[in-house]
């Protein structure tokens, strides 16, 4: 089958959006298409054509990613899908091939990141599981905090337009504190909290902001699924987004969510794997915290990616990286880094560790240790003590998390 892959023209965007949603068994509304058009980078929207028919697509968004004590430009891989009529013919691989080739040729983004619909797909292209995310499902009556908690500010509800302006600076301060977070401009932040009916679900949000003497320092965006059993309220409060820049504001913001009347349970999806609520609740088991895969990452340019972040401990390590999908990365790299910066480049020295691009992506943000990957049979230690030295360098607190699904 002769398939052409190219960027779409602006007038092809609606067909591109319908092709994508159809690949997931969905039919987008005109409102949903326009919602996506507002943030799409048309020149980075790829489509696969079988003759005149559009049969697959893949998109890239230009992001700036928080990495340990730094930031790096990252290609946000999104909107990937192939029509059911054309699956298992190599079209997805061809789209990924073109996408990473384009990123490499441009030379501006040392990293590529994505959320995986199926991990088995993107592992083939060198992506590693770089962070985890959690779900919360707690009964309101079991949400008591440990002794010693005292409110530190006040919470007030805002209208959407006011909230978008007030909350973006809070998000920006919070995202700088944690690897894996994405810098969001105003258009992307509005898209993140868009209330347009999406896949048949109504989304009418409440916007709660926490204020201290310095102004807004936390916020929660939520909606309520109303339910009554007879005369008894059984509603569910769904936390869509919650960020805070101080521990006190964080506790107050969750206390507000837990204390809303007529609510039986509070749920949240895509929370960090080291959620502080585990240590704030009297009964942490009541969170029913469940883990899932979060952000996946891969180095497009190994030296530039490793130089973009800082390291918890001073050290030098030689990594032998095997990258079948991006062969320009294949080789040995000498990394010397610490809290003040890093240098990395090709070397002929004998390796300390042997790993794949997937493994490097998993460890890059500090979400997985090299010892964990070694115990899984993925990383080889060529010199005694190399695993410990690498972990001392790459480990980071807090754990990586990306709250923005793209």
Image: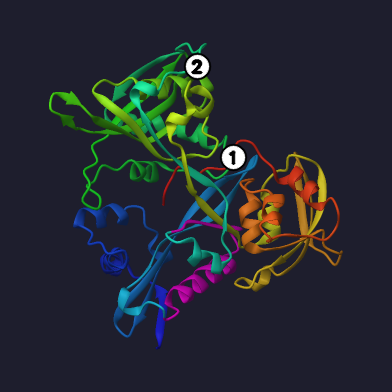
In the rendered structure, the answer to whether residue 232 lies left or right of residue 91 reads left
In the rendered structure, the answer to whether residue 390 lies left or right of residue 79 reads right
Residue 136 included in the magenta stretch of the image: no
User: Does the image show residue 17?
Assistant: yes
* Secondary structure of residue under mark 1: loop
Quarter of the image for the N terminus: give it: bottom left
Number of numbered discs: 2
- The part of the image, by quadrant, that contains residue 231 is top left
- Residue 304 position, x and y percent, is 68, 56
- Which is nearer the N-term, disc 2 or disc 1? 2
Which residue shows up at 31% across the image and 57% down it? 37
Magenta residues?
89-116
| Tag 2 residue | 146
Which residue shows up at 67% across the image and 49% down it? 308
| Tag 1 residue | 399
- Residue 117 position, x and y percent, is 42, 59
Query: Can you tell which of label 2 and label 1 is closer to the viewer?
Result: 2
- In the rendered view, would you say 361 is above or below 260? below
In the rendered structure, the answer to whether residue 11 lies left or right of residue 220 reads left
């Amino acid at each position: 089958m002769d398939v052409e892959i190219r960027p779409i023209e602006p007038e092809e965007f609606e067909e591109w959006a319908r092709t994508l949603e159809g690949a997931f068994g969905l039919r987008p509304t005109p409102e949903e298409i326009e919602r996506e058009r507002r943030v799409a980078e048309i020149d980075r929207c790829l489509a696969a054509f079988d003759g005149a028919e559009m049969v697959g697509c893949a998109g890239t968004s230009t992001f700036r990613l928080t990495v340990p004590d730094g930031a790096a430009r990252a290609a946000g891989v999104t909107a990937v899908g192939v029509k059911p009529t054309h699956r298992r013919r190599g079209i997805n691989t061809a789209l990924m091939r073109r996408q990473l080739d384009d990123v490499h040729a441009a030379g501006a983004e040392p990293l590529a990141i994505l959320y995986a619909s199926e991990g088995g797909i993107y592992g083939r292209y060198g992506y590693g599981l770089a962070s985890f995310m959690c779900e919360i499902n707690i009964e309101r009556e079991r949400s008591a905090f440990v002794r010693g908690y005292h409110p530190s500010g006040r919470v007030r509800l805002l209208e959407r337009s006011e909230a978008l302006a007030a909350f973006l600076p809070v998000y920006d301060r919070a995202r700088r504190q944690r690897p894996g977070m994405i810098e969001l401009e105003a258009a992307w932040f509005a898209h993140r909290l868009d209330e347009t009916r999406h896949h048949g679900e109504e989304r009418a949000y409440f916007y709660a902001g926490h204020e201290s003497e310095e102004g807004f320092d936390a916020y929660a965006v939520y909606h309520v699924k109303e339910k009554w059993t007879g005369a008894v309220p059984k509603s569910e409060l769904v936390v869509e987004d919650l960020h805070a820049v101080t521990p006190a504001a964080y506790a107050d913001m969750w206390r507000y969510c837990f204390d809303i009347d007529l609510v039986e349970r509070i749920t949240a999806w895509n929370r960090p794997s080291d959620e502080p609520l585990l240590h704030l609740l009297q009964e942490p088991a009541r969170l029913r915290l469940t883990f899932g895969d979060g952000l996946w990452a891969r180095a497009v340019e190994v030296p530039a990616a490793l130089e973009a972040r800082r390291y918890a401990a001073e050290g030098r390590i030689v990594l032998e990286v095997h990258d079948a999908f991006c062969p320009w990365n294949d080789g040995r790299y000498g990394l010397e880094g610490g809290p003040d910066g890093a240098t990395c480049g090709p070397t002929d020295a004998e390796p300390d560790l042997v790993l794949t691009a997937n493994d490097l992506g998993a460890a890059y943000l500090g979400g997985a240790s090299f010892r964990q990957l070694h115990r899984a049979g993925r990383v080889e230690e060529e010199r005694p003590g190399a695993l410990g030295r690498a972990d001392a360098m790459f480990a980071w607190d807090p754990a990586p998390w990306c709250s923005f699904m793209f």
